[in-house]
Amino acid sequence: MVSDSLQEEMPFKYASDNLKNNQEIGLLAVKKNPLAILYAGQDVKDNDEIMRAAIEQRGYLLEHANERQKKDIELVSAAIKNVPKAIQFADPEIRDNENIMLPLIE
């Protein structure tokens, strides 16, 4: 749940659907506040660069990535580097990868 104070700092939440799908505006919003990805349109969420910008700041946002992104080792690695528990949102094949899981377990 996003706190009221964080929502107040996120005017992107109130943008039109058209602007929420604008990749340039979406990237700016996410760089300012990674939680903006929660309000982004699907076109913005599907953009790997924008999703990476959100995940690098708040790894748990991997939960909101699409299935293809959850299979992306680099994207998942960025998430777990920030928040190791984010591994729970990765694709099962990634969670079966010893090179990814072993450092988390050690």
Image (cartoon, helix red, strand yellow):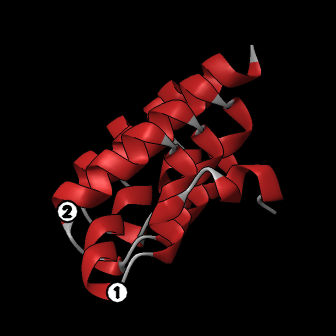
Element on which disc 1 rests: helix
Task: Please state if 46 lies on the left or on the right of 38 as rendered.
Answer: left
Q: Residue at x 59, y 26 (%)?
A: 82
Percent coordinates x, y for residue 98 in the rendering: 54, 31
Instruction: Name the residue tied to disc 2.
Output: 23
Separation (CA) of disc 1 from disc 2: 12 Å
- Give x and y (percent) for residue 22: 20, 70
Image location (x, y in percent) of residue 56: 46, 32
The kind of secondary structure element at disc 2 is helix
At horizontal 75% and vertical 22% (from top left) the residue drawn is 105
Q: Which residue in the structure is indicated by mark 1?
A: 17
| Residue 9 visible to the viewer | yes
Mark number displayed over residue 74: none
- Residue at left offset 44%, top offset 39%: 32
Q: Residues within 10 Å of mark 1 (few under 14, many from 20)?
A: few
Please state the horizontal and vertical placement of residue 46, each as a whole percent of the image: 29, 68
Label 2 sits on what residue type?
Answer: Gln
Is residue 45 found left or right of 101 in the rendered image? left
Numbered disc total:
2
Where 20 falls versus 53 (above or below)?
below
- Residue sticking out furthest to the bottom: 17
Q: Looking at the picture, which amino acid does disc 1 mark?
A: Asp
Identify the residue at horizontal 67%, vertical 31% (top origin).
Answer: 83
